[in-house]
Image (cartoon, rainbow, N blue to C red):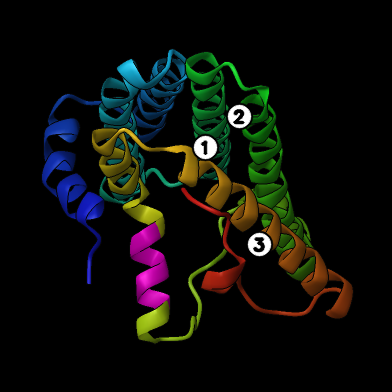
Amino acid sequence: MSTLNRSIAQWIVPWLARLRLSPNQVTLLGLAAGLAAATRFAEGPESWLVGALWLQLSFILDNCDGTLARLQNRTSGLGSWLDTVSDCAVNIGLFYGIGTGLQRDTGQYIWLVGGLVTAVGVFFSYAMAFAVQVHRRGIDAWRHPDPPAGAEPDSRLVGFRKRAREDFSWIVLAGALAGHLGWLLWCGLGSSFAIGLGNLRAILRAPEGEPGVLHEDEMPFVG
């Protein structure tokens, strides 16, 4: 079943194609929207809703670039790298921005530290996800960081994780509307390091060059 953001993206992609936008241009627009969101989150709770709307736009565009690339037959390693780095940058900015905004609102530096550590955790999650691909696929991972389509386990739990990751922006929007995002920061901190450490463990335990793809519980925290 398609996620909500992916369903919206499928409706938008034909319009982007008519505008003659390239997939990489759409990726950069998504990155710009995500960084705008991070900036608004850093301003404090009064700007959270605007930040959440910018983030929503970023996630929708992030679901557009790949579909547009396949539609235009313009998939490439460069595009895959650009998409991966952009996703990582947006998620780092999101959590650091939330931590900064909470520190400005409360005056408690624990939030700033939490935002910084969570940002490090997100980077660690992405780095270890890529390291697993290098370990399993060798030079092919450097050419194209996205894991190839493979036999992922088909279960309700996998489907839930996929929806939660791709529709994460809606969770942020709900938190912004409720005026509570502190819990999201701590969830992000725990989840990002748990996934990163899980990938590191997989590398240490698996023989080099072992075939396979990342399963859902090995993917980066979001994005």
Query: Which residue shows up at 54% across the image and 52% down it?
Result: 187
Residue beneath disc 2: 111
Which one is in front, 86 or 20? 86
Q: Is residue 178 visible?
A: yes
Cα distance between the residues tagged 1 and 3: 15 Å
Q: Which span of residues is magenta-colored?
A: 158-164
* Mark toward the start of the polypeptide (2 vs 3): 2
Residue beneath disc 1: 91
Q: What element does badge 1 sit on?
A: helix
Report how many numbered discs are placed on residues in the image: 3
12 over 214 or under it: above or below: above
Coordinates of residue 29 in the picture (x, y in percent): 35, 23
Tag nearer the camera, 2 or 3: 2
Magenta-span inclusion, residue 22: no
Residue beneath disc 3: 195
Coordinates of residue 205 in the picture (x, y in percent): 86, 79
| For residue 130, side relative to residue 188 (left or right) | right
* Mark toward the start of the polypeptide (2 vs 1): 1
Which residue type carries mark 2? Trp
Label 1: few (<14), some or many (≥20) within 10 Å? many
Query: Which residue shows up at 23% across the image and 35% down it?
Result: 177
